[in-house]
Amino acid sequence: MRTGNAFVAALLAAVLILPAAVSAQADKPGAVLSEAAEAVVVVREVNRETRKVTIETPSGERVIIVVPPEAQNLDQVKVGSKFRMRYLQSVAVYISPTGGQPEAVEHTEVQLAEKGATPGGVVVNVRQIQARVEEIDHAARTVVLTGPEGNRVKVTVDDKVKRFAEIKSGDIVVVRYTEGLAMKMIKE
């Protein structure tokens, strides 16, 4: 199950829970932002050969979802089927407690309905990037970071990041992005 950015934006816009910032770790500067949304979508096309299902969001946008080969219940999905979708995304930013080197890691977990059960599943993807603070301007709240491939980027740090004044050159900043999508067909 994969979604396009436009669908995610439409889903979040439909029933957005505003982000809340909290300290990522009690002893380190950081912040956590999260958003959750829920909506009912309608299947408009099913291509069993390519395993592509076109759904329509509550706002009328059509999005194609690629159903993984492990999903055993695609035969139950028909045009007009309705699915309850829940989407969650969370971004945590904090200073690494142990330091380290810039790196990037990604992990995906998929849980699908068993054969014959109501079609649906859950996909959770976690991406983590560690970048080194190269330059910092506390007054302007800007930081220049070097990523795992040596690329440099200058970012402005939001006021919600607590204890920003404690960040210094050489620190390793960890950004962990978690995205979850759960779908279950609504039996009629």
Image (cartoon, rainbow, N blue to C red):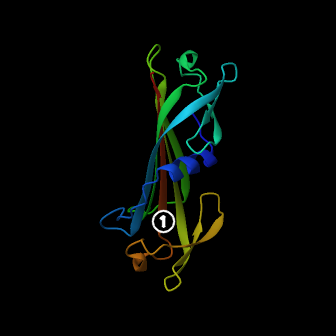
Residue 34 makes an appearance in the image = yes
Q: Which residue is at the far top?
A: 116
Query: At 39% across and 64% down in the image, what residue appears?
Result: 21
Residue 102 location, quadrant: bottom right
Q: Is residue 105 above or below residue 133?
A: above
- Label 1 crowding class (10 Å Cα cut-off): few <14, some 14-19, many 20+? many
- State the residue in front, 171 or 110: 110
Residue 66 x, y percent position in the rendering: 63, 31
Give the vertical position of 148 relative to 10 (above or below).
below
- Residue depicted at 44% across the width and 63% down the height: 99
Residue 110 appears in the figure: no
The three-letter amino acid code for the residue at tag 1 is: Ile
- Where is residue 141 shown, x and y percent of the image? 51, 79
Q: Is residue 106 left or right of residue 152?
A: left
Furthest residue toward left: 26
- Look at mark 1 in the image and give the residue it sits on: 172
Residue 49, given in percent of the width and then of the height, sits at 69, 19
Using the rendered view, name the quadrant where residue 20 is placed: bottom left
Location of the N terminus by quadrant is top right
Q: Nearer the viewer, residue 130 or 55?
A: 55
Residue at x-position 64% and y-position 58%: 149
Return the residue nearer the eye: 35 or 94: 35
- Quarter holding the C terminus is top left
Q: Residue at x 53, y 47 (%)?
A: 11
Instruction: Name the residue nearer the viewer: 47 or 151.
Output: 47
Task: Give x and y (percent) for residue 94.
Answer: 42, 64
Q: Secondary structure at mark 1?
A: strand
**Above or below: residue 120 compared with residue 146:** above
